[in-house]
Image (cartoon, rainbow, N blue to C red):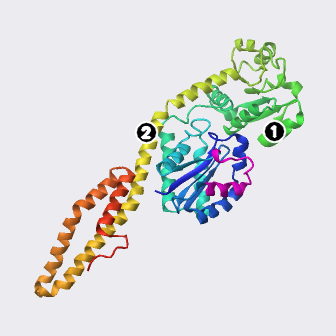
Amino acid sequence: MNLFSVGISHHTASVDVRERMWLSADEARTVLPALKEQFFSECMLVSTCNRTELYGVLRDPVVNEARITGLLLDAKHAEDIVRPDHFIAHRAGAAVHQLFKVAAGIDSMVIGDIQILNQVKEAFQAAGEQHTMGPVMNRLMQATLHVGKRVRTETSLCEGAVSVSYAAVELASKIFADLSRKSALLIGAGETGELTMKHLVGKGIGHVSVANRTRARAEALVADLGGSVVDYEHIVDALRTADIVVTSVNSPTYVVGPDDVHSVMRQRGNNPLFIIDIGVPRNVNPAARKIENLFLYDIDSLNAIVDRNLEKRKRELPHVTTILREELVEFFRWYRSLEVAPAIQDLRDTFEQIRAGEVEKNINRFRAEDRDLVELVTRRIVNKLLHHPLTALKEGSENGNGTSESLTRVKVLRELFGIGTGTKRDE
């Protein structure tokens, strides 16, 4: 079996190594045809921030792996930082299993990564555009996407926020049924705060305001997200109209205190106010939690939610493993048929050739009215002789016997009857 994979990932390489091996779409369009020309009959590349992995069907099963990785290194001029031990290679079933794990989201830095399946799908499509796909890789693509779909529909692996920013948005969605009618205020344009706001925009938040000590940074973020800029000195006033507040300010003192919230809540008519305090040190005095209709969550609260969701995802791993095992069996049942079906046809052709040849040599010994019967009887004899071996060969392929066992049967059959070996049968 010539299926093969090799690559680097977060398991083997740090981010500075991984980013050197990341392939842009244009680079992949150049590398894929070169790989196919030199090493593969079919191949595709998955390249993300966490992995660059090559999958394909080798032309020569004994090819030197270093030559393949060498081509990738040359394409990226990365020999100065990427070492051979950064790469992990898989063959046959292990290569398929690796791709299934990636698509399922269990080989990601965060278990249940919801983006990776689309990235794998895009990798297959890119390979198709470069004409480096073939029957095996196309079937593998179908199986891989089916794995991802099953994991997402039959398990809870991808459910529950596993990042602080997304946990905050999930909480907001539970408190406010319709985010499109709500407004959000970002105080401080820190990385996590900005990401949280982007998630809120993605969820359809009605309006966004940004307040930052450096106004130019706030204006740049508004240009990206939409919305408006609030003067940093007026953030307490802005609390009157905001429904969701995300604070991410580097400050040694509290930015918002209980008195500020008390004053604001009276003016708001006690409409709920949801504050996500991502600042370290905290930006909002925790004493404000006592105020009615104020929902205050800090970084520890969000991390606790993330940890619970991660544990929940881990509990789904046995179910995911079962799905992968089932899909592996199904894929290799098909793959074995690639060897078994031609062998069956070759054996039928061989027996038919012998039968037809013997009938032709001896047909004149029979009366004209018996010749059709001779054809019928000899065909029946051949079919009966072949019935048991062909049935056993088919069932061995269909019932999931080991790949090596099925291929051994095919090899023995070809050797015994001299089919597909170049052996000339006695006339």
What residue lies at 68% left-to-right and 38% top-to-bottom? Answer: 204
Place of residue 354 in the rendered image (x, y in percent of width and height, measured from the top left): 25, 76
**Location of the C terminus (image quadrant):** bottom left
Q: Nearer the viewer, residue 106 or 165?
A: 106
In this picture, which residue range is highlighted in magenta?
66-85
Place of residue 143 in the rendered image (x, y in percent of width and height, measured from the top left): 48, 51
Disc 2 marks which amino acid?
Answer: Thr
What residue lies at 37% left-to-right and 66% top-to-bottom? Answer: 342
Disc 1 marks which amino acid?
Answer: Leu
The relative height of residue 146 versus residue 365 in the rendered view (above or below) is above
Per the image, label 1 sits on a secondary structure element best described as helix
Place of residue 45 in the rendered image (x, y in percent of width and height, measured from the top left): 61, 54
**Residue 242 seen:** no
What residue lies at 25% left-to-right and 60% top-to-bottom? Answer: 389
Indicate whether residue 155 is drawn in magenta.
no
Tag in front: 2 or 1 = 2
Q: How many marks?
A: 2
Indicate whether residue 74 is drawn in magenta.
yes
Residue at image mark 2: 322
Per the image, label 2 sits on a secondary structure element best described as helix
Main SS class of the magenta portion in the image? helix
What residue lies at 82% left-to-right and 36% top-to-bottom? Answer: 228
Measure the C-alpha gap from mark 2 to mark 1. Answer: 45 Å
Instruction: Answer with the quarter of the image where residue 303 lies.
Output: top right
Instruction: Answer with the quarter of the image where residue 297 lies.
Output: top right
Structural crowding at the residue carrying mark 1, measured as other residues with C-alpha within 10 Å and reported as few (<14), some (14–19) or many (≥20) = many
Q: Nearer the viewer, residue 74 or 204?
A: 74
Residue at image mark 1: 221
